[in-house]
Image (cartoon, helix red, strand yellow):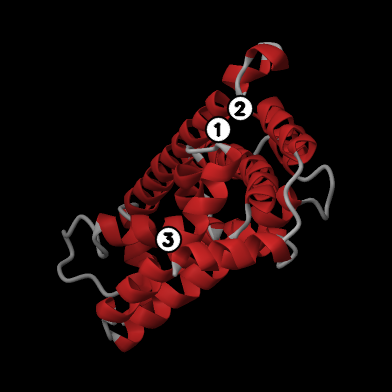
Amino acid sequence: MSSRRSRSRQSGVPSITDDQISDLVSKLQQLIPEVRSRRSDKVSASKILQETCDYIRSLHREVDDLSDRLSALLASTDNNSAEAAIIRSLLM
Amino acid sequence: MNPKTYHHISSNPSSVKSRFTRGFLRAFKKIKRQQRLLPTSSSSSSNPSPRPYLYGRVKIAADKSLALAVGSRRAWSRALLWKIHYKAWRQRSRFNNKKKRLKENKKNKKKKKNDDEEVGFRHAKELRKLVPGGKAMDLCSLLDETAHYIKCLITQVQVMKSIDQIYSF
Protein backbone atom coordinates (compact mmCIF):
# COMPACT_ATOMS: atom_id res chain seq x y z
CA MET A 1 0.00 0.00 0.00
CA SER A 2 2.87 2.40 0.69
CA SER A 3 4.28 1.96 -2.86
CA ARG A 4 0.93 2.86 -4.43
CA ARG A 5 0.84 6.00 -2.26
CA SER A 6 4.31 7.16 -3.34
CA ARG A 7 3.68 6.47 -7.05
CA SER A 8 0.49 8.52 -7.19
CA ARG A 9 2.22 11.34 -5.31
CA GLN A 10 5.11 11.45 -7.79
CA SER A 11 2.87 11.88 -10.83
CA GLY A 12 0.93 14.75 -9.24
CA VAL A 13 3.83 16.79 -7.79
CA PRO A 14 6.36 18.45 -10.19
CA SER A 15 9.85 17.05 -9.67
CA ILE A 16 12.39 19.30 -7.99
CA THR A 17 15.13 20.33 -10.41
CA ASP A 18 18.76 19.92 -9.51
CA ASP A 19 19.45 23.54 -10.37
CA GLN A 20 16.93 24.75 -7.82
CA ILE A 21 18.48 22.61 -5.15
CA SER A 22 22.06 23.61 -5.89
CA ASP A 23 20.95 27.25 -5.98
CA LEU A 24 19.39 27.02 -2.53
CA VAL A 25 22.32 25.06 -1.16
CA SER A 26 24.82 27.64 -2.39
CA LYS A 27 22.70 30.34 -0.77
CA LEU A 28 22.99 28.42 2.51
CA GLN A 29 26.70 28.11 2.04
CA GLN A 30 27.08 31.90 1.98
CA LEU A 31 25.51 32.15 5.43
CA ILE A 32 27.56 29.60 7.31
CA PRO A 33 30.94 30.98 8.41
CA GLU A 34 32.80 27.63 8.33
CA VAL A 35 32.05 26.76 4.71
CA ARG A 36 31.86 30.29 3.32
CA SER A 37 35.59 30.62 2.61
CA ARG A 38 35.90 27.38 0.61
CA ARG A 39 34.91 27.28 -3.04
CA SER A 40 31.50 25.90 -3.90
CA ASP A 41 32.64 23.11 -6.22
CA LYS A 42 34.85 21.62 -3.54
CA VAL A 43 32.17 21.42 -0.85
CA SER A 44 29.52 18.73 -1.19
CA ALA A 45 25.88 19.53 -0.54
CA SER A 46 25.75 16.89 2.16
CA LYS A 47 28.57 18.61 4.04
CA ILE A 48 26.81 21.97 3.73
CA LEU A 49 23.64 20.49 5.23
CA GLN A 50 25.65 18.95 8.04
CA GLU A 51 27.33 22.28 8.77
CA THR A 52 23.94 24.00 8.63
CA CYS A 53 22.55 21.67 11.31
CA ASP A 54 25.59 22.24 13.51
CA TYR A 55 25.42 25.99 13.00
CA ILE A 56 21.71 26.18 13.89
CA ARG A 57 22.37 24.11 16.99
CA SER A 58 25.22 26.41 18.08
CA LEU A 59 23.00 29.48 17.50
CA HIS A 60 20.28 27.87 19.65
CA ARG A 61 22.84 27.26 22.36
CA GLU A 62 23.96 30.90 22.20
CA VAL A 63 20.37 32.11 22.53
CA ASP A 64 19.87 29.81 25.54
CA ASP A 65 23.07 31.07 27.11
CA LEU A 66 22.11 34.72 26.56
CA SER A 67 18.63 34.12 27.99
CA ASP A 68 20.29 32.59 31.02
CA ARG A 69 22.51 35.64 31.49
CA LEU A 70 19.62 38.05 31.04
CA SER A 71 17.51 36.15 33.58
CA ALA A 72 20.49 36.26 35.96
CA LEU A 73 20.57 40.03 35.48
CA LEU A 74 16.86 40.22 36.29
CA ALA A 75 17.32 38.17 39.44
CA SER A 76 20.36 40.10 40.61
CA THR A 77 19.07 43.62 40.01
CA ASP A 78 16.07 42.70 42.08
CA ASN A 79 18.45 42.35 44.99
CA ASN A 80 18.98 46.09 44.78
CA SER A 81 17.64 46.42 48.27
CA ALA A 82 17.07 50.16 48.11
CA GLU A 83 14.66 50.07 45.18
CA ALA A 84 12.93 46.89 46.30
CA ALA A 85 12.46 48.25 49.82
CA ILE A 86 10.92 51.47 48.48
CA ILE A 87 8.49 49.56 46.26
CA ARG A 88 7.53 47.22 49.07
CA SER A 89 6.89 50.10 51.42
CA LEU A 90 4.71 51.77 48.80
CA LEU A 91 2.64 48.63 48.34
CA MET A 92 2.00 47.98 51.99
CA MET B 1 24.00 55.30 27.96
CA ASN B 2 26.15 55.26 24.89
CA PRO B 3 24.21 56.63 21.89
CA LYS B 4 26.41 54.62 19.50
CA THR B 5 25.02 51.30 20.68
CA TYR B 6 21.48 52.48 20.11
CA HIS B 7 22.33 53.75 16.63
CA HIS B 8 23.50 50.46 15.21
CA ILE B 9 20.50 48.59 16.59
CA SER B 10 17.83 50.72 14.92
CA SER B 11 19.33 52.07 11.71
CA ASN B 12 16.32 50.92 9.70
CA PRO B 13 13.18 51.47 11.79
CA SER B 14 11.11 48.76 10.14
CA SER B 15 13.72 46.01 9.79
CA VAL B 16 13.35 42.68 11.52
CA LYS B 17 16.20 43.70 13.80
CA SER B 18 14.54 46.86 15.15
CA ARG B 19 11.11 45.22 15.41
CA PHE B 20 12.63 42.37 17.38
CA THR B 21 14.59 44.79 19.60
CA ARG B 22 11.51 46.80 20.48
CA GLY B 23 9.32 43.75 21.10
CA PHE B 24 11.91 41.92 23.14
CA LEU B 25 12.77 44.97 25.28
CA ARG B 26 9.08 45.49 25.98
CA ALA B 27 8.62 41.86 27.04
CA PHE B 28 11.83 41.93 29.06
CA LYS B 29 10.78 45.04 30.99
CA LYS B 30 7.38 43.47 31.60
CA ILE B 31 9.01 40.39 33.13
CA LYS B 32 11.22 42.64 35.23
CA ARG B 33 8.23 44.64 36.50
CA GLN B 34 6.20 41.53 37.31
CA GLN B 35 9.11 40.05 39.15
CA ARG B 36 9.62 43.17 41.26
CA LEU B 37 5.99 43.37 42.30
CA LEU B 38 5.80 39.76 43.47
CA PRO B 39 5.51 39.52 47.25
CA THR B 40 8.69 38.15 48.80
CA SER B 41 8.39 35.32 51.29
CA SER B 42 10.95 36.79 53.65
CA SER B 43 12.79 40.07 53.58
CA SER B 44 16.16 38.33 53.25
CA SER B 45 15.21 35.91 50.47
CA SER B 46 17.59 35.91 47.52
CA ASN B 47 15.07 35.48 44.69
CA PRO B 48 11.33 36.08 44.70
CA SER B 49 10.95 33.87 41.62
CA PRO B 50 13.13 30.81 41.02
CA ARG B 51 15.85 31.20 38.37
CA PRO B 52 14.73 28.41 35.98
CA TYR B 53 11.26 29.95 35.78
CA LEU B 54 12.72 33.32 34.81
CA TYR B 55 15.01 31.71 32.26
CA GLY B 56 12.04 29.96 30.62
CA ARG B 57 10.08 33.23 30.42
CA VAL B 58 13.00 35.15 28.93
CA LYS B 59 13.64 32.46 26.33
CA ILE B 60 9.97 32.28 25.33
CA ALA B 61 9.85 36.08 25.12
CA ALA B 62 12.91 36.08 22.85
CA ASP B 63 11.48 33.44 20.48
CA LYS B 64 8.04 35.02 20.48
CA SER B 65 9.28 38.54 19.71
CA LEU B 66 11.51 37.15 16.95
CA ALA B 67 8.60 35.32 15.33
CA LEU B 68 6.36 38.38 15.69
CA ALA B 69 9.03 40.64 14.18
CA VAL B 70 9.17 38.42 11.09
CA GLY B 71 5.40 38.20 10.96
CA SER B 72 3.33 35.57 9.19
CA ARG B 73 5.05 35.82 5.81
CA ARG B 74 7.40 32.96 6.66
CA ALA B 75 6.37 29.38 7.40
CA TRP B 76 8.90 28.98 10.20
CA SER B 77 7.69 32.09 12.08
CA ARG B 78 4.09 30.90 11.82
CA ALA B 79 5.10 27.46 13.07
CA LEU B 80 7.10 28.97 15.93
CA LEU B 81 4.20 31.18 17.04
CA TRP B 82 1.83 28.25 16.84
CA LYS B 83 4.18 26.11 18.91
CA ILE B 84 4.46 28.79 21.61
CA HIS B 85 0.70 29.28 21.82
CA TYR B 86 0.07 25.55 21.78
CA LYS B 87 2.50 24.95 24.63
CA ALA B 88 0.92 27.75 26.68
CA TRP B 89 -2.54 26.35 25.98
CA ARG B 90 -1.46 22.87 26.97
CA GLN B 91 0.01 24.14 30.17
CA ARG B 92 -3.20 25.97 30.97
CA SER B 93 -5.60 23.13 30.23
CA ARG B 94 -3.17 20.44 31.49
CA PHE B 95 -4.45 17.74 29.18
CA ASN B 96 -1.77 15.38 28.01
CA ASN B 97 -2.89 13.84 24.70
CA LYS B 98 0.27 11.81 24.28
CA LYS B 99 -1.41 8.87 22.53
CA LYS B 100 -3.03 11.08 19.88
CA ARG B 101 0.22 12.84 19.01
CA LEU B 102 2.17 9.58 18.60
CA LYS B 103 -0.30 8.27 16.03
CA GLU B 104 -0.11 11.48 13.95
CA ASN B 105 3.70 11.42 13.88
CA LYS B 106 3.79 7.88 12.52
CA LYS B 107 1.58 8.83 9.55
CA ASN B 108 3.78 11.72 8.40
CA LYS B 109 7.16 10.00 8.84
CA LYS B 110 6.93 7.63 5.86
CA LYS B 111 5.96 10.29 3.30
CA LYS B 112 8.83 12.68 4.05
CA LYS B 113 11.51 9.96 4.14
CA ASN B 114 10.82 8.99 0.51
CA ASP B 115 11.09 12.56 -0.72
CA ASP B 116 14.42 13.30 1.00
CA GLU B 117 16.21 10.11 0.04
CA GLU B 118 15.15 10.42 -3.60
CA VAL B 119 17.14 13.61 -3.91
CA GLY B 120 19.90 12.09 -1.80
CA PHE B 121 19.84 14.32 1.26
CA ARG B 122 19.98 12.32 4.44
CA HIS B 123 20.78 15.28 6.64
CA ALA B 124 17.46 16.88 5.69
CA LYS B 125 15.87 14.77 8.44
CA GLU B 126 18.03 16.46 11.07
CA LEU B 127 17.37 19.86 9.56
CA ARG B 128 13.62 19.31 9.70
CA LYS B 129 13.83 18.77 13.44
CA LEU B 130 15.79 21.99 13.95
CA VAL B 131 13.78 24.43 11.84
CA PRO B 132 10.31 25.18 13.26
CA GLY B 133 7.66 23.72 11.00
CA GLY B 134 10.28 21.84 9.02
CA LYS B 135 8.51 18.49 9.23
CA ALA B 136 5.68 19.58 6.96
CA MET B 137 7.74 21.26 4.22
CA ASP B 138 9.01 19.94 0.93
CA LEU B 139 12.74 20.01 0.40
CA CYS B 140 12.87 23.22 -1.62
CA SER B 141 10.93 25.31 0.89
CA LEU B 142 12.88 23.69 3.72
CA LEU B 143 16.18 24.98 2.30
CA ASP B 144 14.68 28.39 1.63
CA GLU B 145 13.18 28.70 5.10
CA THR B 146 16.43 27.51 6.66
CA ALA B 147 18.38 30.35 5.05
CA HIS B 148 15.95 32.96 6.35
CA TYR B 149 15.79 31.28 9.76
CA ILE B 150 19.57 31.39 10.12
CA LYS B 151 19.66 35.09 9.22
CA CYS B 152 17.02 35.85 11.86
CA LEU B 153 18.74 33.72 14.49
CA ILE B 154 21.96 35.68 13.92
CA THR B 155 20.00 38.92 14.40
CA GLN B 156 18.47 37.56 17.58
CA VAL B 157 21.87 36.67 19.01
CA GLN B 158 23.34 40.08 18.09
CA VAL B 159 20.49 42.02 19.71
CA MET B 160 20.46 39.91 22.86
CA LYS B 161 24.21 40.32 23.21
CA SER B 162 23.91 44.10 22.97
CA ILE B 163 21.07 44.16 25.50
CA ASP B 164 23.13 42.00 27.84
CA GLN B 165 26.08 44.41 27.55
CA ILE B 166 23.90 47.46 28.14
CA TYR B 167 22.11 45.98 31.15
CA SER B 168 25.19 44.67 32.86
CA PHE B 169 26.56 48.14 33.42
Q: Are marks 2 and 3 in contact (CB under 8 Å)?
A: no
Task: Give me the chain letter of mark 2.
Answer: A
Query: Is residue B28 visible from the viewing direction of this image?
Result: no
Query: Is residue B33 visible from the viewing direction of this image?
Result: yes
Task: Give me the chain letter of mark 3.
Answer: B
In the rendered image, which residue does mark 1 sit on?
Answer: A49
Tag in front: 2 or 1: 2
Using the numbered discs, state the Cα–Cα distance from disc 2 to disc 1 in whole angstroms: 6 Å
Which residue sits at x=71%, y=17%?
A40
Which quadrant of the structure image shows residue A45? Answer: top right
Which residue sits at x=55%, y=62%?
A6
Give, as a three-letter code, the residue at label 1.
Leu
Tag shown at residue B32? none
Q: How crowded is mark 1: few (under 14 residues within 10 Å), some or many (20 or more)?
A: many
Tag shown at residue A45? 2
Tag shown at residue B109? 3
